[in-house]
Amino acid sequence: MLYRATISVGAFAPAFLWFLRLALEDLPWRSIFRRSAPLIALLTAISIIPWLEWFIPSSSTRLNRTYGDGYVVYAALMFVIYAGLCWKGVSFARKAPKRRRIEFVYASLGGSVLGLAIVGMMLLSVVRGAAPSANVSVILAGLFAACMMFGLSTQRLFGAEQVSRVAAKTVCIAATVGLAIALLHSFLFPLLPIWLLFGVMGVGAVGVYAAVEPLLERWLFRRPAVEAARSALHRVARTCLAEAHLIDEASNVLGDWADCSVYLITPTPEPTSHALIHLKPEDPVITDLQAARWITPERLHREPHSEARERLVAFLDQNLLSAAVISEGSDPPVILATQRRPSLRPITYPEICTLLEFSAILQLALARVRLVETAMHADRLSVIGIVGATLAHEIRNPLHAIRTFAEMLPAHYDQPDFRHRFSHLIGDEISRIDHLISQLAQMASPRRPSLVPTDFNRVVEASLDLVRLSLERKGIRIESQLQPLPTPFPTDAALLRQVILNLCLNAGNAFADQPAPRWIRVATSSTGTGIRLTVSDNGPGLPSSIQARLFQRFVSLSDRGLGLGLTISREAMLSLGGTLQYDAAGSASSGGTVFHAILPFPADSDPAPESEGIAPVSLAPATRAPVGAPIGAVPA
């Protein structure tokens, strides 16, 4: 029975070779199945022959083998099919590109020749009256497998390890399915009619394949390094909101996986400071690479000579690259280029497929980064417009003092004390104006956070001064409760100022026509593990329907707002290593809104005691981004 099952399953081997040849022609799947339907129907009919008495009579034994007419018909039909595959294969190999020709010769055409040899031995056994030697079949199959592995490995299409795993998977599936068919036949043959038996065996074979194939895939093709790199790359894509930082982090992750340097290239009109390889958007190399999707020196060596090939070869040689892939689409295209490995081991096709997957991930991440950077810059500019009146007032005061002293100068020039006061006043007031303008410029310029020792409470006071005038004009009182804090505290004053301004301005806009009293309270305290900045108000509060989406982009209660203030403030806090949280319980008890911005103490400093008079709030734990991460980093 095992012999009959093996011969029956073997009837479908030409279908695999036929599918492989059509796949190498880059035909759509619908066209492949349409062209394969007649062959599948013929092979299905042939696979039934081994189970008939017509194939090998039941009186035949291992020592006295007797072949029926069905055996000759089976062998003759399979011989014709394999011969047709060889003829089709030779004609395809003549017109195929060199790369496809090599793949086809070693896989599809080689398998057809092997099948032709085995079926020829079956026909020869009928003439000789003896069964074909199983050893000869095993030797032929072994030679074919060895030649295919050698060819694909030396041509650097696949690594020997990959080919071995594919071969092991195929052998295991064939053996398991064949054994299942043999067992079903032996148990059900006396119980079922032949037509129903074949149906049950077919369903059983499909079921065994569906159960075994995923297990073998996980067991033989599990790649922990790829899975770790994929997870790390998704984390980088989620957390990095600065383009330079995204490129640096992604290059490090990919370099660890590929065991060589990996360059992330995005075409730009002018070279950037972080770009090691620069390509302009109109560079023909980009068009050539988009047409090829991926290149390696080995693949280009097999391609016919052309201008595009020469440009790509020069691109790899000039930059000492072993492979390059480009993502699909053009907004923006992402090129991943691997440097030559120290071991000189080439980049194989499975690794190319992984690089193509990674390039798609990074393309989406890069597009997201650029959109967020634009939105954050627009938010900074909108905040600058709001506090412009306050800055104008602050600048007018020192200018008025300078003008007053200048008008008094002719009458009091001879007085040394007046000249001394005048010279000091001019320097102090100009320094004050310069400081205000510097604050404005820092808010307007997008950049990565720079952590420097800072007086935390002084930054809070300076930030409140920027919005105090505009809020008091609306009848809103600013209150501050600043507890003594460890000084200096490493943070980015510009980012912290932006968070405070956004929270205060959002609170001010929420009051609308609410009657007095109206106040916004800003408090600082030490939590033992960090500094907590609390911004609360007695406004109308937030509807419960919006609280779950509070930190999502473009969620706003104002008709004029973009809904980016809280999102960008949270991302700014995360980039500083802290968190921004909405205190639902505190808001419910106060009737307004309460936000807590928490920054942790540096790892190498001693935690400060909690401030007296302010109880620590109990909030859901939040994952903190690494200190110094880019603006907008979110936890993985």
Image (cartoon, helix red, strand yellow):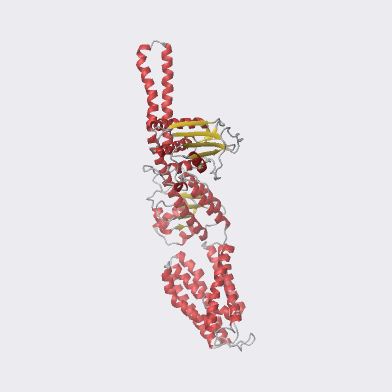
Measured from the top left, where is residue 378 in percent x and y?
39, 41
Q: Quadrant of the N terminus?
A: bottom right
Q: Quadrant of residue 167?
A: bottom right
Compared with 327, 198 (above or below) is below
Measured from the top left, where is residue 19 in percent x and y?
47, 71
Which residue is pictured at 51% across the width and 60% down the height? 349
Q: Which of 354 and 299 is in front in this view?
A: 354
Which residue is pictured at 35% across the width and 12% down the height? 411
Q: Which of 612 and 238 is in front in this view?
A: 612
Q: Is 290 situated left or right of 482 in this image?
A: left
Q: Can residue 344 be seen in this view?
A: no
Which residue is pictured at 46% across the width and 30% down the height? 462
Compared with 323, 207 (above or below) is below
Q: Return the residue found at the far bottom.
A: 59
Measured from the top left, where is residue 396 in percent x and y?
37, 25
Q: Is 408 situated left or right of 587 in this image?
A: left
